[in-house]
Image (cartoon, rainbow, N blue to C red):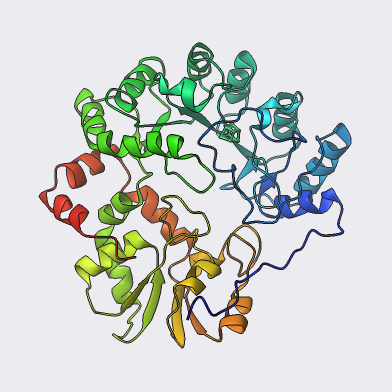
Amino acid sequence: MGRELPTLEPTLVLQGKGYREVLKREMDAGKIPLSLGKKCPVECSFCYELDHSYRETNDPPKTTQDDWEFILNYINAKPTDPLQYWCLGGNEYMEWTDLFLHPRAMEWVEDFLRHTDKNIQFFTVGFVHVPKIHQLAEQYPGRINFELSVITLSPYRQQLMPHAPSVRHLMKVLDGPAVSSANFYAFGEQTMSRDAREIAKINQHCVLWMGCLTPVGGITEATAGIMRRGRKFLAGEAERIYDAGVPNLSTIHTEAYVTAFLNRKRIASAFDALKLEKKDTVVMARSVAKVLNMHRKNRARFLSVPNATLGGDSDCTVLLTFDDIRQRLTGEKRLHIPKCVMESGRGPNMDIRGVTLEEFTNKTGVKVKVLHKIDTTFANARLYRNGTLKNFVEDYVRNPWSAEYEALPLSA
Ligand code: SF4
C-alpha cells in the first residue's frame, strides 16, 4: 500500500522570502544563525550535510555587521531561560557549517556573552583562537558549552578531515578551561582508546563523548566503510578506556542498538504505561522494535520503520519522517506515533523534512493517535541516562545477554 500512496512533500515556506526570514526561523528554534555565505570549506568526508536535500534550505549570504546587530537584537528580545544554550549556527533552514571560519566569529561570541544574559553552545572541529577562547571561558563561567569535534587523533584524521586543524592545535584548545566536551570515535584498534588517554593527560574536566560515527546518505562507500569498521572495535576500545580508569566523565552514545539495549527496562515500562492492545500498531525505529520484540513480543504490533530519508545506517525514532512511515504502510487504518517524530526544530507538529501530521493523515487516510509521553525530552533522557562508559562495559560488553540480543535480526 505504501507505494500506491503519494510521496509526502513538505510545504515550501521560504519561497519568495528574503534571507532574514531564514534567520528569524532559526532564531525561533534557538539558533544563532551566522553564515559563511558558502559551503563548509572543511569538507569532512563524513559530514552529515553532504546530502541535505531532504529539507528546504536557503543559505543566507555571509553575515555582515548589520546582520549581526539584527540577530543580537532579535535574540535579546526573547525571554531568558537559564537552562537554555543558544546554538551557534542554524541547521533547520540553512546548511550547517563550521562557523569559526567566519572572520568575526570570535568577536561576535564575545559580543553575545557581553550584550545578552543568555548561554551559548558551539560545535567546531577546532578553529577557535586559543588564548581568547580560554579567556572567555574564565570570564563567563557556566555560560559556554563548547563541544569540540575531535573526531580522531589517529592517522584516519588525514583521510576523513584533511582540511581540519592540526592535532597540535587541538591539544592547545584542549589545554585550558574552554572545552566542555570532546567527541571522538572508534575506527580501529588503539584509536578511540589512545585518543581518550591523550586527551585525559591534558584535560581531566571535559566530558569524553565517544562511540562510532554512523553513515548517512550522501557519504561515499569508502568513508562509510571506515565508519562501520569502528563498530567491530568499539567494545575492545571501550574496555581499554574503562581499565585505564581515565578521570574524565566518559560516555558512549552513538550506537542506536546499544542505547536501546541499555535502556531496555525503561523502554519496556514506557510501553506498558501506554496500555496498548495487541491489535494496536505502534511506529518506532528498528532498534526500539528489536528491544520490544525481545521483552514485549506480540503485546502490540510494532511497526519497525527504517530511516529511509536520512539513509545509511541511521536508526532513530526522533529522526523518522512521515514519508518513512508512509513507505511502511500495508493497509493500516490507525497508527500510534510517538510525539518525538513531530517535534523537529522546523515547527509545530512537523517532522525533520517539514511535513506536518495533518498532511500525513490527509494524504494517507490513516488516523493517528499521538503518543505524547514518548516525546523528545523522554528520548534525550534515555540517550544520556545510561550512556556512561561504565554502563556500556558492565551492562553491555560484559553482559552475556547482549550477545543474544545482537544475534536477533533487526525486524525491518
Ligand atoms: S567541519 Fe563540520 S560542517 Fe564542516 S564539513 Fe566538517 S563536519 Fe561538515
Q: Nearer the viewer, residue 191 or 412?
A: 412
Q: Kindly indicate the quadrant of the structure image that contains residue 363.
A: bottom right
Compared with 216, 318 (above or below) is: below
Q: Is residue 6 left or right of 375 when viewed as pictured?
A: right
Please name whichever residue, 154 or 217, is drawn nearer the observer in this view of the structure.
217
- Counting from the top left corner in percent of width and height, residue 114 is at 73, 31
Looking at the image, residue 357 sits to the left or right of residue 325; the answer is right
Dividing the picture into quadrants, the one containing residue 364 is: bottom right
Check the image and report above or below for 356 versus 17: below
Q: Is residue 341 left or right of residue 194?
A: right
Q: Residue at x 74, y 55 (%)?
A: 25
Q: Please identify the residue farthest to the top as the structure is shown.
A: 168
Ligand 1 appears in which quadrant? top right
Residue at (44% x, 85% y) in the render:
331
Q: Is residue 11 left or right of residue 169?
A: right
Question: Residue 271 placed where, x, y %?
Answer: 32, 72
| Observer able to see residue 77 | no
Residue 308 in the image: above or below residue 337? above
Residue 328 x %, y %: 44, 73
Tally the marks: 0
Residue under the point 72% across and 51% down: 57
Where residue 125 appears, as percent x and y from the top left, is 55, 27
